[in-house]
Every structure is written in C-alpha cells, then in structure tokens.
Image (cartoon, rainbow, N blue to C red):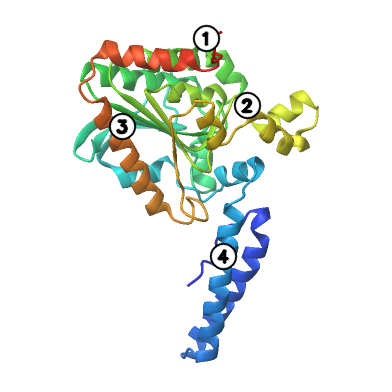
C-alpha cells in the first residue's frame, strides 16, 4: 500500500499525484474485495512510473532541494538512530549547573557490542516533541551537558558517537545571558582535546557553531542529502542581499552539500542514501550509518590519546589551507 500520510516537498508534486492515483486504485481494489487484472496492471504501471520519476528527481537535486530534503519532517532523527544502533541505552540528563536541555540527548549504551557514549541533537517528530526538544536548537546547558558526557567518556576510555541535526544553537535572550557562545566554544574545544575516538555524523542539518560543537571529531561523515554550513541559507541571504527569499542562491554559493564538502575536505565520507532519501527507507540508512561508524571505530582502535588529539587538531587546522601551504 502507498502511504497517504506522506509529506511531499514542493518539487515532488508530480510524484505525489502519481502516488495518490496508486493509493486510489489500491483502495478501490480493497473495498471491492477483489483485484481485477486490469486494476493490478494499471497499479503496477503507475508504480513503475512513480519509481522512475522518484529516481530521476533525486538524481539531480540542486543545493536548495537538498536543503529541503535535509529538513524533511519524516527524516530519521537522533531517537531513531539511537533505537536502531544503540543497545542498553541509559540517558544522562542535566549539565550540573543550570538545568536539563532536551535539544541535546546523550548517555551510555552499547554499539554492536562496544560500550560507547552517544550524543545527538533531537528535533522531535510531532508538535509536542518538537516543542519539548526546541526543534533541536540547544541552549548553553545542552552543550555543557555534552561536555560532561565527553569528560566521562575520557575517564572511562569510551569512544564518543555524535549525531548532528540542528538548524543552529538557540538564539534566545536567555541563552545569550547564560553564555551561549562560551558554551559552544568549550564544547568544540572538548571535542578537539578528547582522548578517545570521536566519530560525528551529520544526519540532517549541520547548522553553524551549534553543529560544530558536536562535530569536531576524528571522522566527520554526512548523509548524501544532508547539509553543513556556517549559517542557514535564509540567514546568509538576509545578510548578503537583505532578502531571505534568495535562500536558494545562498545555498548554491555556500556549497552546503555533501559532495562539495567532501571535495573541500571538510567531511571525510558521504554515506549514500536510498533513492527517495533517508525518510523513505529509514531502516536501510540507519544500517548504512552503523556500518560506516563501525568501520571507522575499528580504524581508530589502538591509537593513543595523544595520537587521537593530534590527528583531530591537524584535521581541523588543515581546513581552509591553500594547497601550496599558504
């Protein structure tokens, strides 16, 4: 059966019409209690056409369309990756200074038999949980909680896995009063100086310092249709052209997509997504993410804390350097 509750992006409208026809035919067949050869043939024909159209659409996504896919409301979030990949998860809350921040979730668990500390942005999946998690936009206490968890990981020699999906840190007055920029800087510094392996995966949006604070790892990966940028396309357009409607132009200019960032050596690996994006095949993409994480954890096994810190520092110092060493 087709999914009548699926959310379609603007560029997917022709596909939505096809899948609506498929749903109508399937409903008619179901209500009549029989599936005539003509109906079955027409349904199969439309489904084949829909699959072809889906593949065509996703084979030529421009940066703005990739941005839309990265923000898709049905895209798997941290809670989904945690349930699929982490066993015996025990959430640890609070920053021991101010309060708990639900935009960043973290704790202890087992990844394929290995004890790890896992930390990620959580956007929420419906109105209630989106409000609870503040749409994945963390306040200072969220980053201070992440620092606390990384301190614990180093104390007990545990690898850290981070999952990044945020439009950016929360820009509210209270957050600024409590030291938002300092908390982000401290979290970034803690990532850089961590004495255990740190593997970061951008699963949706990697927005600004709010993302870097959890993504300064030994290995930084991105899903194929995720984005990673210093500012949102809308924010960039508002600054450069005083017109947020030019977000599409900004997305192109900023090189926010995974292939661009791989070429610039800002990320180390792009994880391919199934045709139609991660939101259409969540189990498949989570399995691929798990395999990629396991591969890099094995590669980092046995490295000393000093070697891990040095590799991480060199990796980030190298970003932006000219090929001639300038």
Which sits earlier in the primary sequence, circle 2 or circle 4?
Answer: 4
What residue sits right under mark 3 in the picture? 296
Residue at the outermost top position: 326
Label 4 Cα crowd, 10 Å radius (few <14 / some 14-19 / many 20+): few
Q: Is mark 3 on a helix, strand or loop?
A: helix
Q: Is residue 248 visible?
A: yes
C-alpha distance separating marks 2 and 4:
34 Å
Which dot, 3 or 1, sits closer to the camera? Answer: 1
Which sits earlier in the primary sequence, circle 2 or circle 3?
Answer: 2
What residue sits right under mark 4 in the picture? 52
Label 3 Cα crowd, 10 Å radius (few <14 / some 14-19 / many 20+): some
Q: Is mark 2 on a helix, strand or loop?
A: loop
Q: Is residue 110 left or right of residue 128?
A: left
Which dot, 2 or 3, sits closer to the camera? Answer: 3
C-alpha distance separating marks 1 and 2:
27 Å
Residue under the point 26% across and 13% down: 305
Q: Which of 246 and 103 is in front in this view?
A: 246
Query: Residue 290's mark?
Result: none
Query: Residue 231's mark?
Result: 2
What residue sits right under mark 1 in the picture? 325
């Amino acid at each position: 059966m087709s999914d009548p509750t699926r959310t379609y992006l603007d560029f997917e409208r022709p596909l939505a019409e096809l899948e609506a026809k498929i749903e109508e035919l399937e409903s008619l067949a179901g209500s009549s209690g029989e599936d005539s050869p003509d109906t079955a043939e027409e349904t199969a024909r439309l489904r084949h056409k829909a699959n072809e159209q889906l593949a065509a659409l996703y084979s030529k996504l421009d940066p703005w369309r990739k941005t839309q896919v990265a923000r898709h409301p049905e895209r798997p979030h941290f809670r989904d990756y945690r349930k699929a990949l982490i066993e015996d998860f025990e959430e640890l809350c609070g920053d021991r200074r101010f309060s708990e921040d639900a935009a960043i979730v973290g704790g202890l668990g087992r990844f394929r038999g290995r004890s790890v500390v896992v930390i990620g942005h959580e956007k929420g999946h419906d109105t209630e949980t989106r409000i609870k998690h503040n749409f994945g936009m963390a306040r200072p206490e969220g980053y201070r909680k992440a620092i606390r968890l990384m301190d614990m990981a180093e104390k007990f020699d545990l690898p850290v896995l981070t999952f990044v999906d945020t439009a950016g840190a929360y820009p509210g007055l209270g957050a600024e009063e409590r030291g938002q920029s300092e908390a982000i800087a401290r979290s970034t510094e803690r990532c850089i100086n961590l004495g255990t392996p740190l593997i970061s995966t951008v699963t949706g949006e990697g927005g600004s310092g709010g993302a870097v604070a959890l993504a300064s790892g030994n290995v930084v990966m991105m899903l194929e249709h995720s984005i990673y940028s210093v500012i949102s396309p809308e924010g960039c357009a508002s600054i450069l052209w005083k017109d947020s409607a030019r977000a599409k132009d900004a997305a192109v200019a900023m090189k926010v997509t995974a292939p661009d960032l791989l070429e610039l050596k800002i990320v180390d690996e792009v994880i391919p997504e199934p045709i139609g994006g991660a939101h259409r095949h969540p189990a498949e993409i989570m399995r691929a993410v798990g395999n990629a994480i396991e591969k890099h954890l094995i590669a980092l096994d046995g490295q000393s804390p000093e070697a891990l810190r040095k590799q991480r520092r060199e990796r980030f110092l190298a970003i932006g350097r000219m090929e001639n060493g300038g």
